[in-house]
Image: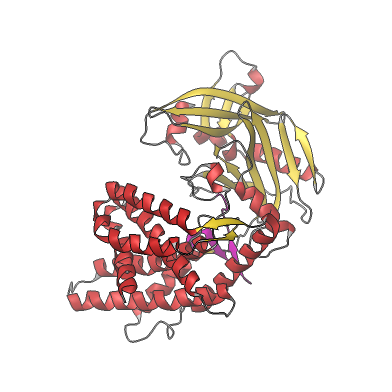
Amino acid sequence: MTRYLADARWFGGKGRDYDVVDVQRVATMVGPPVVTIDVLTVRYADGGVELYQMPLSHYPEPQERIQHAYLGAAPGVDPAVAHTYDAVHDREAMAVYLETFDDTPANASVELGGLTFHRLAGHELDTEAHSTLFSGEQSNSSVAFGDDSLLKVFRKVTPGRNPDIEIHAALTRAENPNVAALYGWVEGSTTDGRLDLAMIQQFLRTASDGWDLALSSVRNLFAEADLHADEVGGDFAGEAERLGAAVAEVHQVLREHFGSASWSGREVAAAMGDRLTAQIEVAPALAEHADALRGVYDALAALGEDDSAQRIHGDLHLGQTLRVVHNWKLVDFEGEPAKTLADRVLPDNPWRDVAGMLRSLDYAARAVERDFAFESASGQQGAADQLSFRAQEWTRRNRQAFLTGYLQGREMSPAEQTLVAAYEADKAVYEVGYETRNRPTWVSIPLGALTRLAEGAAR
């Protein structure tokens, strides 16, 4: 089990010293096949502790079709369950989940083998569909059932309600069109408390990734050297405006459902200042921007207090969006992975989501600029300046379009401009630290954003 965990794409402890110090079996479904769920307690050498879910399928004989997911034989146990596999790779095991969801009445729940299955009304599941595991998933395991539905199995789990389920349920019940409809979810429990283990939702088979669409638009612009951003065939502004409207609608429903809470500019600014201090230790290049950044934070602190905090996405960027035929969908409402569950479910200012999307638009343009600069044979400063100008043109156009959609035609107030500047700065500081640790050759992108921010604040 420990060896399999270390090689798993979704395991977040790679590169750290750890031990699996406890394994709790929280559920057994008799199938066939027998499907069990274990929760592993991982303790790191630095004292950190995480819980990981392992859904397992068991057979009396080896199963060659899923040999790649084999965890080993279990000597001394019932021969009927001697050979163990990671269940998300096993179509027969996934069919057990699907059939149990199908047997759960709408707006009700069913208990089975230590699990509680919940269903929402409004969709009949296709129980004849075969499962297909998505290979690119980073932190969870997602399994599509034909073109009908998608099961997301949470790998790293935390006692309490998973915000991805909680927010999807609220938006689905409100019939908001900007999310994949939630069909149901599964929960279990350990000695640590209740755990949300999986959710089943609408499968957006024909959807296009928002990040990929934005990159294609920038590439189209760069390929047309004599055209402006509003003249190329791949202009993204209309999509950016529709995306802004979608985010605004989601924020409105979340505010109506979960309510509002107090927000303090002084407290948020202080937290941003603390993050800046910590990130300077990781990325000394931030130091030259510190004075300008603290000026932005001071302006935020001066806004005082209000009741603008609410539930938000919490980790919004283009990679968390999907374009379908008629509209945009927002996905993955789990919040920032690095935060604790307690922090991820706290009310926050919706302008944090807006700033995250604005930073993502800038990142898309600068990532393509970086690629074109490497591909350019000339290496002349004039060519580099032209690429930078065109990236800035694309960013400016699409930022404004997104804000137009989000604001529903009204103008931004001075206080909202201060909020956006501060949250963008905070996000860029995080990006500098991330790129310094993981992709040093990319750190110029967020550092450039901070330079432009400082220039704007100085005018």
Quarter location, residue 286: bottom left
Rendered position, 195 above or below 163? above
Percent of width and height locating residue 264: 51, 57
Q: In the picture provided, is 26 more to the left or to the right than 427?
A: right
Q: Quadrant of residue 83?
A: top right
At x 73%, y 36%, the residue is: 116
The residue shown at (45%, 82%) is 233
Q: Depth check: 129 or 444 in front?
A: 444
**Residue 330 within the segment the image draws in magenta:** yes
Name the foreground residue: 211 vs 330: 330
Tell me the residue at 67%/55% (across/down): 258
Left or right: 244, with 382 as reference point? right
Q: Position of residue 315 (x, y in %)?
A: 50, 55
- Figure disc tally: 0
Image quarter where the C terminus lies is bottom left
Residue 18, compared with residue 137, is above or below; it is above
Q: Answer yes or no: is residue 189 visible.
A: yes
- Image coordinates of residue 58 in percent, x first then y, are 62, 27
Residue 335 location, x and y as percent? 53, 51
- The image's colouring method is secondary structure
Task: Verify whether residue 134 appears in magenta.
Answer: no
Q: Is 171 situated above or below 56?
A: below
Magenta segment boundaries in residue numbering: 318-334
Query: Is residue 62 visible in the rendered structure shown here?
Result: no
Say which of 260 and 366 sits in front.
260
- Residue found at x 48% / y 45%: 339
